[in-house]
Amino acid sequence: MVATRLDPPLVEACEHGRGRCFGDRGFAGAAQPSDYSSDVTAAQQTSASSGRDATQSAPLTVLVYSDDRALRRDVLLAIGKRPAADLPDVEFLECATEPAVIKAADGGKVDLFILDGEAVPAGGMGVARQLKDEIFRCPPIVVIIARPQDAWLATWSRADAVAAQPINAVALAETVSEVLRARSAASAQR
């Protein structure tokens, strides 16, 4: 039997070792579509009930948006459980569609957005611009670009930082660490 992609994409919540994914395209015979908001709520409940010790600082939530599962996996592997020793652990929220990103952003529990500038149909740079326009004190955004010539577009999108493809694990972890430290410093001054 040949698996075929369905259009429009199914919205499914799937669990795997490092986070949750929302909006992944399903294959024929996959689970029935569900509501984006219930998927995001489930992720927030999973994060809240993780049973962390009260003495540890709360984990940071990093949203990774790309329609490419391999790119999302590479980002998760590059950042790891903790991008730097002086930062708390991170939990990942993976999104493959723009509506899933917007729903998660509306929840207000995201500490950092990592957006694929090459995602289709909604590119990460356009999503970044929309988030910066619509969210008061928007969390930092890192845009992943495929070509160095796209750096000016990342500036237009108001991204806080840019990372290049193919993913360089050391450089991405360093970029994420710098952006998260800057956010911590800014929130400490408020």
Image (cartoon, rainbow, N blue to C red):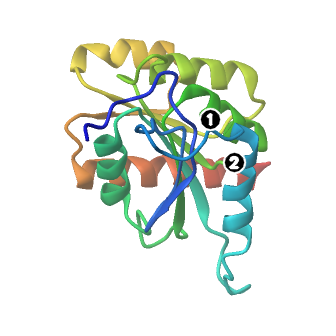
Type of residue at label 2? Val
**Are circles 2 and 1 on residues that touch, CB within 8 Å?**
yes
The picture quadrant where one finds residue 155 is top left
| Residue at image coords 75%, 41% | 37
Task: Residue 168: give its label.
Answer: none
Determine whether the residue tagged by mark 2 lies in a helix, strand or loop.
helix
Residues 180 and 65: in front is 65
Is residue 97 placed above or below 59 in the rendered structure? Answer: above
Q: Is residue 40 left or right of residue 145?
A: right
Residues 58 and 19: in front is 19
Is residue 145 placed above or below 189 in the rendered structure? Answer: above
Q: Is residue 101 left or right of residue 166?
A: right
Q: Please state the horizontal and vertical placement of residue 161, each as a whole percent of the image.
A: 43, 34
| Residue at image coords 68%, 48% | 39
Type of residue at label 1? Ala
Q: Is residue 2 left or right of residue 161?
A: left
Screen quadrant of the N terminus: top left
Q: Please state the horizontal and vertical placement of residue 176, each as a whole percent of the image.
A: 43, 49
Residue placed under numbered mark 1 in the picture: 100
Determine whether the residue tagged by mark 1 lies in a helix, strand or loop.
helix
Is residue 68 placed above or below 45 in the rendered structure? Answer: above
Label 2 – label 1 distance at C-alpha: 8 Å
Task: Residue 40: give its label.
Answer: 2
Is residue 139 placed above or below 102 in the rendered structure? Answer: below
> Badge 2: few (under 14), some or many (20 or more) residues near its Cα, within 10 Å?
many
| Residue at image coords 63%, 18% | 130
Q: Please state the horizontal and vertical placement of residue 43, each as a whole percent of the image.
A: 66, 57
